[in-house]
Amino acid sequence: MMKGINWAGVVAAAVVSMAIGFLWYGMVFEAQWVALMNLTPEQTAATSTPLMMTLGFVNTAVMAVGLGWLVARTAASGWMGGAKVGLGAGVFFAATTGMLDYFYSGMNMGLMPINIGYLLVVYTVAGALVGGVKMPAKATAAA
């Protein structure tokens, strides 16, 4: 089942996805997200503990492996091919599943563009990395 996965791309996708999350929620949309979530500073800090960050990375790594599998199974190639697969997975699986929380759990609808936008960006970038990052060719020793 794991045959054909681009592991270098998966690792790059997991690391870059975490960096995007830091920028997205920690800088670009931080004030808006915190306000819409009605979080206190203590609650906000609780989302950044080593345990939460580790769990977040594991979750992101699983997503990257899944994209690696999907990119391999669709025979997508290169940065653009991977980005298309990632965007498709983001739209058809991540975004639609994520939106259920807003429809049925009473989550603040103002959060939807931030959270779903994040998913679409991360899935697209991660797909591009899985499709485009390649291990450098091993140098052969001269005889």
Image (cartoon, grey):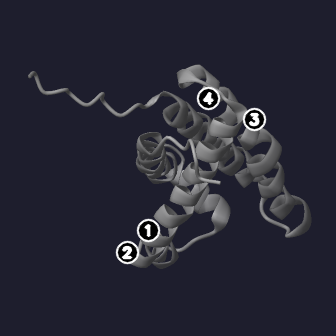
Q: Residue 83, located in which quarter of the rendered image?
A: top right
Q: Nearer the viewer, mark 1 or mark 3?
A: 3
Q: Which residue is mark 1?
A: 53
Q: Which residue is mark 3?
A: 88
Above/below status of 2 relative to 142:
below
Residue 50's disc number: 2
Q: Amino acid at mark 3?
A: Gly
Point 53% across, 74% down: residue: 40
Percent across and percent down for residue 91 are 78, 40
Q: Amino acid at mark 2?
A: Pro
Q: Is residue 78 left or right of residue 94?
A: left
Q: Amino acid at mark 1?
A: Met
Point 59% across, 24% down: residue: 77
Distance from Cα at disc 4 to Cα at disc 2: 30 Å
Residue 83's disc number: 4
Disc 1, SS: helix
Point 54% across, 31% down: residue: 131
Q: Residue 70, located in which quarter of the rendered image?
A: top right
Going from the N terminus, do you reach mark 1 or mark 3 first? 1
Point 43% across, 73% down: residue: 45
Above/below status of 101 relative to 99:
below
